[in-house]
Image (cartoon, rainbow, N blue to C red):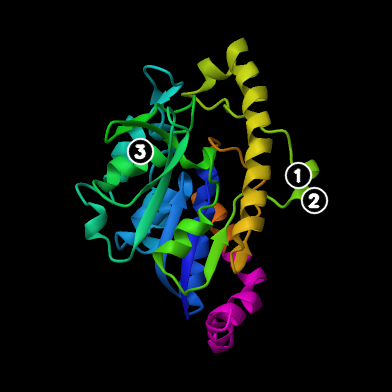
Amino acid sequence: MDISLALGGGGVKGNAHLGVLRALEKEGFSIRAVAGTSAGGMTAAIYAAGHKPQEIIDALKEMKQGDFYSFGRGPALLGLKGITQALRKFINEETFADLRIPCALTAVDIESMQEIVLQEGRLLDAIMATIAIPGIFPPQEWGGRLLVDGGVLDPVPVQVARSLAPGLPVVAVSLSPPPEKWSQLPALKFIPETPILKPIARLRVAQAFDIFARSLEMGSFMLADTRMKLEKPDVIIRPQVGDIGILDKVDVVEVAARGDAAVEEVLPQLHRVAGWRGKVRRWFT
Protein backbone atom coordinates (compact mmCIF):
# COMPACT_ATOMS: atom_id res chain seq x y z
CA MET A 1 0.00 0.00 0.00
CA ASP A 2 2.01 2.92 -1.35
CA ILE A 3 1.45 6.48 -0.14
CA SER A 4 3.08 9.92 -0.22
CA LEU A 5 3.31 11.93 3.01
CA ALA A 6 3.01 15.66 3.74
CA LEU A 7 4.31 16.47 7.24
CA GLY A 8 3.27 19.79 8.78
CA GLY A 9 5.11 22.17 11.07
CA GLY A 10 4.70 22.71 14.81
CA GLY A 11 8.01 22.83 16.70
CA VAL A 12 8.36 20.06 19.31
CA LYS A 13 4.87 18.88 18.39
CA GLY A 14 6.69 17.38 15.42
CA ASN A 15 7.74 14.43 17.58
CA ALA A 16 4.23 13.13 16.85
CA HIS A 17 5.33 12.61 13.23
CA LEU A 18 7.65 9.87 14.45
CA GLY A 19 4.72 7.95 15.92
CA VAL A 20 2.77 8.44 12.70
CA LEU A 21 5.64 7.02 10.65
CA ARG A 22 6.05 4.12 13.07
CA ALA A 23 2.35 3.24 12.97
CA LEU A 24 2.11 3.51 9.18
CA GLU A 25 5.05 1.14 8.74
CA LYS A 26 3.57 -1.28 11.30
CA GLU A 27 0.29 -1.33 9.37
CA GLY A 28 2.07 -2.22 6.14
CA PHE A 29 2.01 1.14 4.36
CA SER A 30 5.00 1.91 2.15
CA ILE A 31 6.00 5.57 2.16
CA ARG A 32 7.28 6.27 -1.34
CA ALA A 33 7.83 10.03 -0.99
CA VAL A 34 7.73 12.63 1.77
CA ALA A 35 7.47 16.40 1.85
CA GLY A 36 7.79 18.47 5.00
CA THR A 37 7.58 21.95 6.41
CA SER A 38 9.45 23.17 9.50
CA ALA A 39 9.46 20.39 12.13
CA GLY A 40 7.82 18.16 9.53
CA GLY A 41 10.64 18.99 7.15
CA MET A 42 13.23 17.95 9.71
CA THR A 43 11.46 14.63 10.27
CA ALA A 44 10.97 14.11 6.54
CA ALA A 45 14.65 14.60 5.80
CA ILE A 46 15.89 12.29 8.56
CA TYR A 47 13.40 9.59 7.56
CA ALA A 48 14.21 9.90 3.86
CA ALA A 49 17.89 9.51 4.75
CA GLY A 50 17.10 5.99 5.93
CA HIS A 51 16.62 6.30 9.68
CA LYS A 52 13.76 4.29 11.17
CA PRO A 53 11.17 6.03 13.38
CA GLN A 54 12.01 4.04 16.52
CA GLU A 55 15.73 4.67 15.99
CA ILE A 56 15.07 8.43 15.89
CA ILE A 57 12.84 8.29 18.99
CA ASP A 58 15.46 6.31 20.92
CA ALA A 59 18.17 8.82 20.00
CA LEU A 60 16.07 11.89 20.83
CA LYS A 61 14.99 10.63 24.24
CA GLU A 62 18.65 10.43 25.26
CA MET A 63 19.28 14.07 24.30
CA LYS A 64 18.73 17.05 26.60
CA GLN A 65 16.23 19.32 24.93
CA GLY A 66 17.69 22.36 26.63
CA ASP A 67 20.90 21.79 24.68
CA PHE A 68 19.04 22.43 21.41
CA TYR A 69 18.68 26.14 22.12
CA SER A 70 21.28 28.86 22.47
CA PHE A 71 21.14 32.64 22.40
CA GLY A 72 21.08 33.88 18.84
CA ARG A 73 22.76 36.68 16.96
CA GLY A 74 21.15 39.04 14.51
CA PRO A 75 17.37 39.20 14.02
CA ALA A 76 16.51 36.19 16.21
CA LEU A 77 15.98 35.31 19.86
CA LEU A 78 17.71 31.95 19.57
CA GLY A 79 20.48 30.34 17.54
CA LEU A 80 20.51 27.02 15.69
CA LYS A 81 23.89 25.71 16.85
CA GLY A 82 22.45 23.18 19.32
CA ILE A 83 19.91 21.86 16.82
CA THR A 84 22.61 21.56 14.18
CA GLN A 85 24.77 19.49 16.53
CA ALA A 86 21.83 17.21 17.36
CA LEU A 87 21.01 16.73 13.67
CA ARG A 88 24.57 15.61 12.95
CA LYS A 89 23.76 12.39 14.77
CA PHE A 90 21.60 11.58 11.75
CA ILE A 91 22.86 13.75 8.88
CA ASN A 92 26.28 15.13 7.99
CA GLU A 93 27.21 15.93 4.41
CA GLU A 94 24.33 14.11 2.70
CA THR A 95 22.56 15.81 -0.17
CA PHE A 96 19.06 15.26 -1.53
CA ALA A 97 20.63 12.97 -4.14
CA ASP A 98 21.70 10.59 -1.35
CA LEU A 99 18.18 10.02 0.00
CA ARG A 100 16.48 6.63 -0.31
CA ILE A 101 13.08 8.11 -1.29
CA PRO A 102 12.09 11.41 -2.95
CA CYS A 103 11.93 14.22 -0.41
CA ALA A 104 11.31 17.97 -0.54
CA LEU A 105 11.30 20.65 2.15
CA THR A 106 9.63 24.04 1.92
CA ALA A 107 10.86 27.47 2.97
CA VAL A 108 9.92 31.07 2.22
CA ASP A 109 12.07 33.74 0.58
CA ILE A 110 11.57 36.61 3.01
CA GLU A 111 12.44 39.23 0.37
CA SER A 112 10.38 38.05 -2.63
CA MET A 113 7.66 36.53 -0.39
CA GLN A 114 7.69 33.32 -2.43
CA GLU A 115 7.48 29.70 -1.32
CA ILE A 116 10.69 27.85 -2.17
CA VAL A 117 10.73 24.07 -2.59
CA LEU A 118 14.12 22.65 -1.60
CA GLN A 119 15.02 19.46 -3.46
CA GLU A 120 18.70 19.85 -4.27
CA GLY A 121 21.91 20.52 -2.42
CA ARG A 122 23.07 19.88 1.12
CA LEU A 123 20.34 18.41 3.30
CA LEU A 124 21.45 19.99 6.57
CA ASP A 125 21.30 23.47 5.04
CA ALA A 126 17.78 22.81 3.77
CA ILE A 127 16.64 21.69 7.23
CA MET A 128 18.06 24.84 8.82
CA ALA A 129 16.03 26.90 6.34
CA THR A 130 12.72 25.09 6.75
CA ILE A 131 12.84 25.37 10.58
CA ALA A 132 13.89 29.04 10.72
CA ILE A 133 10.82 30.34 12.60
CA PRO A 134 10.78 34.12 11.99
CA GLY A 135 11.95 36.05 15.05
CA ILE A 136 12.85 32.87 16.94
CA PHE A 137 15.58 31.39 14.72
CA PRO A 138 17.73 33.33 12.23
CA PRO A 139 16.90 33.29 8.51
CA GLN A 140 19.20 31.13 6.38
CA GLU A 141 21.03 31.97 3.17
CA TRP A 142 20.38 29.62 0.27
CA GLY A 143 21.54 30.35 -3.27
CA GLY A 144 21.43 34.10 -2.79
CA ARG A 145 18.05 34.00 -1.08
CA LEU A 146 17.23 34.64 2.58
CA LEU A 147 14.90 31.88 3.73
CA VAL A 148 12.60 31.40 6.73
CA ASP A 149 10.27 28.67 7.97
CA GLY A 150 8.12 27.15 5.22
CA GLY A 151 5.08 27.19 7.47
CA VAL A 152 4.73 30.92 6.87
CA LEU A 153 3.02 30.13 3.55
CA ASP A 154 2.53 26.35 3.51
CA PRO A 155 1.95 24.74 6.93
CA VAL A 156 1.27 21.27 5.43
CA PRO A 157 2.88 20.81 1.95
CA VAL A 158 0.21 18.64 0.32
CA GLN A 159 0.78 19.74 -3.26
CA VAL A 160 4.54 19.27 -2.92
CA ALA A 161 4.01 15.71 -1.68
CA ARG A 162 1.68 15.06 -4.60
CA SER A 163 4.27 16.29 -7.09
CA LEU A 164 6.90 13.93 -5.68
CA ALA A 165 4.81 10.82 -6.36
CA PRO A 166 2.08 11.50 -8.95
CA GLY A 167 -0.71 8.97 -8.80
CA LEU A 168 -0.21 7.98 -5.19
CA PRO A 169 -2.61 8.98 -2.40
CA VAL A 170 -1.36 11.88 -0.30
CA VAL A 171 -1.63 11.55 3.47
CA ALA A 172 -1.33 14.89 5.27
CA VAL A 173 -0.20 15.02 8.89
CA SER A 174 -1.36 18.29 10.44
CA LEU A 175 -0.21 19.35 13.90
CA SER A 176 -2.92 22.00 14.14
CA PRO A 177 -6.44 21.11 15.33
CA PRO A 178 -9.57 21.45 13.20
CA PRO A 179 -11.42 24.79 13.47
CA GLU A 180 -14.13 23.45 15.78
CA LYS A 181 -11.48 22.81 18.46
CA TRP A 182 -9.62 26.13 18.32
CA SER A 183 -11.62 27.68 21.14
CA GLN A 184 -10.75 24.73 23.41
CA LEU A 185 -6.98 25.18 23.18
CA PRO A 186 -5.11 26.25 26.32
CA ALA A 187 -3.32 29.61 26.32
CA LEU A 188 0.31 28.55 25.87
CA LYS A 189 3.45 30.62 26.26
CA PHE A 190 5.36 30.84 22.99
CA ILE A 191 8.60 31.26 24.95
CA PRO A 192 8.46 28.84 27.91
CA GLU A 193 10.42 29.46 31.11
CA THR A 194 12.94 26.68 30.59
CA PRO A 195 16.42 27.27 32.12
CA ILE A 196 17.95 28.59 28.91
CA LEU A 197 14.91 30.70 27.97
CA LYS A 198 13.88 32.01 31.41
CA PRO A 199 15.93 35.26 31.15
CA ILE A 200 14.18 36.00 27.86
CA ALA A 201 10.69 34.79 28.83
CA ARG A 202 10.39 37.26 31.72
CA LEU A 203 11.23 40.35 29.69
CA ARG A 204 8.32 42.62 28.77
CA VAL A 205 9.29 42.41 25.10
CA ALA A 206 9.04 38.59 25.29
CA GLN A 207 5.60 38.82 26.88
CA ALA A 208 4.54 41.10 24.03
CA PHE A 209 6.05 38.62 21.59
CA ASP A 210 3.92 35.87 23.18
CA ILE A 211 0.75 37.76 22.25
CA PHE A 212 2.05 38.52 18.77
CA ALA A 213 3.12 34.90 18.21
CA ARG A 214 -0.23 33.51 19.39
CA SER A 215 -1.97 35.81 16.94
CA LEU A 216 0.25 34.50 14.16
CA GLU A 217 -0.52 30.94 15.25
CA MET A 218 -4.23 31.59 14.71
CA GLY A 219 -3.42 32.66 11.16
CA SER A 220 -1.30 29.56 10.67
CA PHE A 221 -4.17 27.32 11.80
CA MET A 222 -6.50 29.03 9.36
CA LEU A 223 -3.96 28.85 6.53
CA ALA A 224 -3.35 25.14 7.12
CA ASP A 225 -7.07 24.41 7.13
CA THR A 226 -7.73 26.51 4.02
CA ARG A 227 -4.87 25.05 2.00
CA MET A 228 -5.86 21.48 2.85
CA LYS A 229 -9.43 22.20 1.77
CA LEU A 230 -8.08 23.50 -1.55
CA GLU A 231 -5.39 20.86 -2.11
CA LYS A 232 -7.50 17.95 -0.86
CA PRO A 233 -5.18 15.33 0.63
CA ASP A 234 -6.69 11.85 0.48
CA VAL A 235 -6.43 11.44 4.27
CA ILE A 236 -5.68 13.89 7.08
CA ILE A 237 -4.03 12.63 10.27
CA ARG A 238 -4.27 15.00 13.25
CA PRO A 239 -2.28 13.99 16.35
CA GLN A 240 -3.76 15.62 19.45
CA VAL A 241 -0.93 18.01 20.33
CA GLY A 242 -2.83 21.26 20.89
CA ASP A 243 -1.70 21.42 24.52
CA ILE A 244 1.99 21.64 23.51
CA GLY A 245 3.83 24.88 22.71
CA ILE A 246 6.35 24.83 19.88
CA LEU A 247 9.37 25.25 22.21
CA ASP A 248 8.03 23.33 25.23
CA LYS A 249 10.05 20.67 27.00
CA VAL A 250 8.36 17.39 26.10
CA ASP A 251 8.58 13.65 26.60
CA VAL A 252 9.49 12.47 23.09
CA VAL A 253 8.13 8.97 23.69
CA GLU A 254 4.77 10.28 24.92
CA VAL A 255 4.35 12.76 22.06
CA ALA A 256 5.30 10.10 19.50
CA ALA A 257 2.62 7.84 21.00
CA ARG A 258 0.05 10.51 20.14
CA GLY A 259 1.06 10.03 16.52
CA ASP A 260 0.45 6.28 16.78
CA ALA A 261 -3.00 6.94 18.24
CA ALA A 262 -3.88 9.39 15.46
CA VAL A 263 -3.10 6.78 12.81
CA GLU A 264 -5.36 4.25 14.55
CA GLU A 265 -8.25 6.72 14.31
CA VAL A 266 -8.07 6.91 10.50
CA LEU A 267 -7.00 3.36 9.61
CA PRO A 268 -10.21 2.55 7.70
CA GLN A 269 -9.71 5.66 5.55
CA LEU A 270 -6.06 4.83 4.95
CA HIS A 271 -6.82 1.29 3.83
CA ARG A 272 -9.63 2.55 1.61
CA VAL A 273 -7.51 5.08 -0.30
CA ALA A 274 -4.33 2.99 -0.49
CA GLY A 275 -5.99 -0.33 -1.35
CA TRP A 276 -6.92 -1.57 -4.81
CA ARG A 277 -10.31 0.17 -4.81
CA GLY A 278 -8.58 3.47 -4.18
CA LYS A 279 -6.18 2.84 -7.06
CA VAL A 280 -9.04 2.10 -9.45
CA ARG A 281 -10.86 5.25 -8.34
CA ARG A 282 -7.77 7.40 -9.01
CA TRP A 283 -7.37 5.93 -12.50
CA PHE A 284 -10.81 7.19 -13.49
CA THR A 285 -10.77 10.60 -11.76
Q: On residue 128, which mark appears? A: 3
- Image location (x, y in percent) of residue 65: 44, 38
- The segment highlighted magenta reads 260-285
Q: Is residue 284 magenta?
A: yes
Q: Secondary structure at mark 3?
A: helix
Q: Residues within 10 Å of mark 3 (few under 14, many from 20)?
A: many
The three-letter amino acid code for the residue at tag 2 is: Glu
The three-letter amino acid code for the residue at tag 3 is: Met
The Cα atoms of the two marked residues, 3 and 1, are separated by 29 Å
Q: Verify CB contact (< 8 Å) between mark 2 and mark 1.
A: yes
Q: Secondary structure at mark 1?
A: helix
* Furthest residue toward top: 204
Residue at x 56% of width, y 61% of height: 172
The three-letter amino acid code for the residue at tag 1 is: Trp
Q: Is residue 31 left or right of residue 221?
A: left
Residue indicated by mark 1: 182
Q: Secondary structure at mark 2?
A: helix
Q: Is residue 19 magenta?
A: no
- Whichever of callouts 3 and 1 sits on the residue coming sooner in the sequence is 3
Quadrant of the frame with the C terminus: bottom right
Residue at x 59% of width, y 64% of height: 233
Q: Quadrant of residue 44?
A: bottom left
Residue indicated by mark 2: 180
- Image location (x, y in percent) of residue 9: 52, 46
In this picture, is 185 found above or below 50?
A: above
Instruction: Tell me the chief SS of the magenta region.
Output: helix
- Image location (x, y in percent) of residue 66: 44, 33
